[in-house]
Amino acid sequence: MRYEAPRSVEEAVTALAGQTGAHVLAGGTDLLVKLRSEMIAPELIVDIKRIAGMREITAEEGGWRIGAAVSGAEMGEHEGLCADWPGVVEAAELIGSTQVQGRATIAGNLCNASPAADSVPAMVAASAVARIAGPEGTRDLAVIDVPQGPGKTALGPGEFITSIFLPPRGARSGDAYLRFIPRTEMDIAVVGCGISLSLDEAGRISGARVALGAVGPKVILVEAAAEALKHRALDAGALDDLATACARAATPIDDKRGTAEFRRHVAGVLARRVAVIAEARAKGDTA
Amino acid sequence: MALDDSKKTREFKVVGTRPDRPDGIDKVTGRARFGADMVAPGMLTGRVLRSPHAHARILRIDTSRAEALPGVKAVVTRADFGAVPAHVADIMENCLAGEKALYDGHAIAAVAAVSASVARQALRLIEVDYEVLPHVTDVDEAMKPDAPVLHEGRQQETVPPGMSGNVISRCEFGHGDIEAGLKQADRVIERTYRTAATHQGYIEPHACLATMTADGQGELWVCTQGHYMVRNTCAAILGMDQGRLRVTASEIGGGFGGKTTVFLEPVALMLARKSGRPVRMVMSRSEVLRATGPTASTSIDVRIGMTKEGRITAGFAELRFQGGAWPGSPVGMGAMSGFAPYDLENVKTVGWDVVTNRPKAAAYRAPGAPMAAFAIESAIDELAHGFGLDPLEVRLMNGADEGTKSSYGPTYPAIGLKATLEAAKSHPHWTAPLGKNQGRGVACGFWFNFGGDTSVSLSVTPDGTVTLTEGNPDIGGSRAAMTMMAAEELGIPYDQVRTVIADTGALGQNEVTHGSRVTFSVGLATIAAARAAKAEMCRRAARVWGIDPDAVEWEDGAARPAGPNAGKFPPMTIRDIAAIAPKTGGPISGHHEVMAEGAGVSFATHMVDVEVDPETGATKILRYTVFQDAGKAVHPSYVEGQFQGGAVQGIGWALNEEYIYGEDGILQNAGFLDYRIPVASDLPMIDTVILEIPNPGHPYGVRGVGETSIVPPLAAIANAVSAAAGVRMTQLPMSPPRVLAAIQAGG
């Protein structure tokens, strides 16, 4: 097994080109676990942490570009990011333990392509875009289009994510993420829900993005939920319609982590709770 | 040994204080050596090939390709061991399968190689032909007459004809007339309860390092609860004299009963014998969960009658425990213990021991008792609430006391059940207000406690400090407790005594660290050994003073003339006597060997508040208080630690922990992600109240405290969740999907 730590995106692309059994290392919190548990036997590991910009959060056109090696803990310490996208940050901060937080990245969380990934529904709700480098050059792909199924992504051979872009946070808007786990931490989402809301001047919902995790083979953007909320105040009726839309959109399975029926129900419960938080944030509540 | 003068309260100087544990620094700085921390020159890595099937006949094992791999030094299968004595036959079968693989993860073969990666490769080169057989993993399914049968010819005479061969034995306990008792009741309830198999969840995986010399002498470094047991078992399996195998216990990262047998050890010794090299084996977490002892899963029917005043007129329980692939589930202890807190005229329990295609159950903290208590304490709670009675008062009304004939036979001496109930009743927790969706539950629990073979030696060094040598791994602060009892008895400071856990070459037979026996039995032997050393020191002083040894007494760490008639001599301290020992008869030591009896039973009452989220079924533990009789708490912090630890393991068992098997008989959650033990943020501070009702069988009144604390939580939490959710929960774990389904069905 070889290990390389290139200093530029170009070097990384070269190292990965044509190499079978190559794995990209950023935080390593999935990769090293797979290595230790003998699920993979890489021939090459390309560590991207030393590439310029990979560990930086930079302002860009009113939004934020988050380098692929930025950890959850670093996101949590970034005031601007926390102010604009608290839902994405709180999702990223749910990944693993305090120790894991010092390493785990949202780009890695996305590439691991687990249906239960915590940061992915929050990123999808935020309309996040992944920047991808590869042998054919650089391209941008909406985060929702990256996962293709459990363990599968839209990344081609030799491609890797260099950053995640979060667009400008509009006026009177807010986001939030909650997950359901049987414990209080150190667990994997049985259902995850990320919502981003924008309000008009009257406090009615002008735009909504509702995303569910762990209730299908990949993250689900619930268009019907967004439609149900549009131009309405977030009252009891709107919340009921939101919950119904989410429960309907969920396509869960029965497994050791919960029954399909339970997951469908909890998808609706979480959506209500997340929407209330997102609305409060849109109204300027910073809690 | 009887309690010292039970009429007056003894003033202790060291016992009852809270000094730092002598092994603490090493453990918090990472210096302590656990099972996997030992190395030897030329050491090989051993690895185990495990069955991917729940039940399969092994038609052929071909190890030739693995043996030919460069770096592989030995491969062993069951064939290498030949016939073994009957008393270790099942253990042998569990360590390496013979004719059949009996569960997912059952060991089939093992290799020793120069590195882990070579060993891993070698395992892939071992060819095994299996004939896959039908399997059964559920206890009730396994009892059906048409269930796949694991073993022929193992059923005992206690089982009526016509039952499945998986039903190994039946046991029965109790007295009185159940039907007559039920007729006196104002209400009789009948319920069926189910509990899932749970694992002890110790943090340290099984690990050992074995060496075998060409002349047949062996050494073993091992993480275990009892290295004497390891020696005796491995010697029997390998056909060695016990004296030729020396076993040293490493520090131990938890056991809870699960390290009271062997898994890797005979295999490591055989690999070492075949390779001529030291062999180290360390299990992964997945191996620990798949192939070492969880406890039994159970199905229990309960029938209890109660008068409207709260008097229990009769109690009956039928308990079905599956204990994995071989006989020996803890159903007998469950059947004995479930009604033990109560003084009942009519009580009967029947237990069935059943085998299934699961790993063999190992002991787990009060084996069998938590499940029985869950069923019986749930039913009592439901009856009490049905009559609008206070559940603590109902338990007090029916509670066992000194002189009560217990449900399992013996008549109790002084016991502490009612003291724990009275303490619970007067505690502020009992009357604290509850909020919306919150509920409070209480339950009682009992454990027998145990004594057993114990051998200790205490020596006075030439400078007058003391070394205490004992043979039980320190799993719960026992070094500190022994040090304290030796210091107390000798009248010297705690820091003048050092306690060493000796290897099997140093002492006589010591029973495994189980049955909450160590502080009681080893403590009792330590006190006796210290008294022997004191008597010898008094003789030495008498010799110096030229007076009769009977005229010398020991007080405050020194020999003194006993009264004015003995003569006027300045006291001789332990240092003074040690310094002149060569001139007065040589080295000074005391030792004691005993088959300890008189381990006093221990009772507890637990109280817990929970909040249930009615939309998700999630349960949060809000407040938890343990009330337990310790007899005499030698080191109160470690007694509290035992109370808290049992409660926490019970919380995991009640809420989330379970072995999940697929239709294919394969364990679905062999890792700590999906086998959910509680994490710190799941728990409130567990409050504790220590009661001290002296055990008549120990000089200081000590009772074992390690196990009773896991007996009440399952029921206490079920009672609290049922109150909070408004629906009676009868199946564990009370995981969110199950609680939500119950709420939705109930509403």
Image: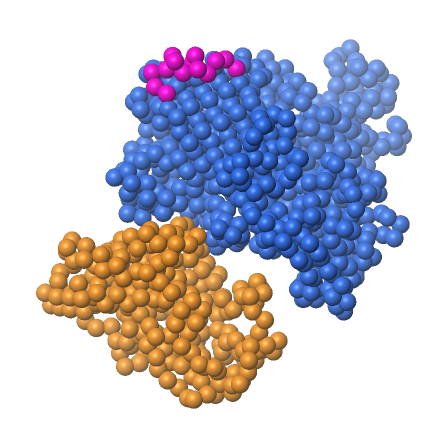
Chain colours: A orange, B blue
Q: Is residue B25 above or below residue B694?
A: below
In the image, what residue occupies the spot 50% across and 20% down?
Answer: B348
Q: Is residue A4 above or below residue B216?
A: below
Instruction: Based on the picture, tell me whether residue B185 belongs to the magenta stretch.
Output: yes
Q: Is residue A215 above or below residue B570?
A: below
Instruction: Based on the picture, tell me whether residue B158 belongs to the magenta stretch.
Output: no
Give the image location of residue A215, x and y in percent. Answer: 34, 60
Quadrant into which the C terminus of chain A falls: bottom left
Give, as a single range, the part of the protein colored magenta.
Answer: B175-188
In the image, what residue occupies the spot 47% across and 67% down?
Answer: A103
Q: Is residue B420 at least partly visible in the picture? A: yes
Dividing the picture into quadrants, the one containing residue A231 is bottom left
Dividing the picture into quadrants, the one containing residue B360 is top right
Give the image location of residue B277, x and y in percent. Answer: 80, 58
Dividing the picture into quadrants, the one containing residue B389 is top left
Quadrant into which the N terminus of chain A falls: bottom right
In the image, what residue occupies the spot 57% across and 26% down?
Answer: B160
Q: Is residue B724 left or right of residue B510?
A: left
In terms of depth relative to the viewer, which is nearer, B287 or A72?
A: B287
Q: Is residue B329 at least partly visible in the picture? A: no
Q: How many marks?
A: 0
Q: Is residue A286 above or below residue B572?
A: below
In the image, what residue occupies the spot 38% across and 68% down?
Answer: A75
Give the image location of residue A276, x and y in percent. Answer: 22, 57
Give the image location of residue B19, x and y in percent. Answer: 59, 37
In terms of depth relative to the viewer, which is nearer, B148 or B202?
A: B148
Outermost residue, left direction? A202
In terms of depth relative to the viewer, which is nearer, B620 or B68?
A: B68
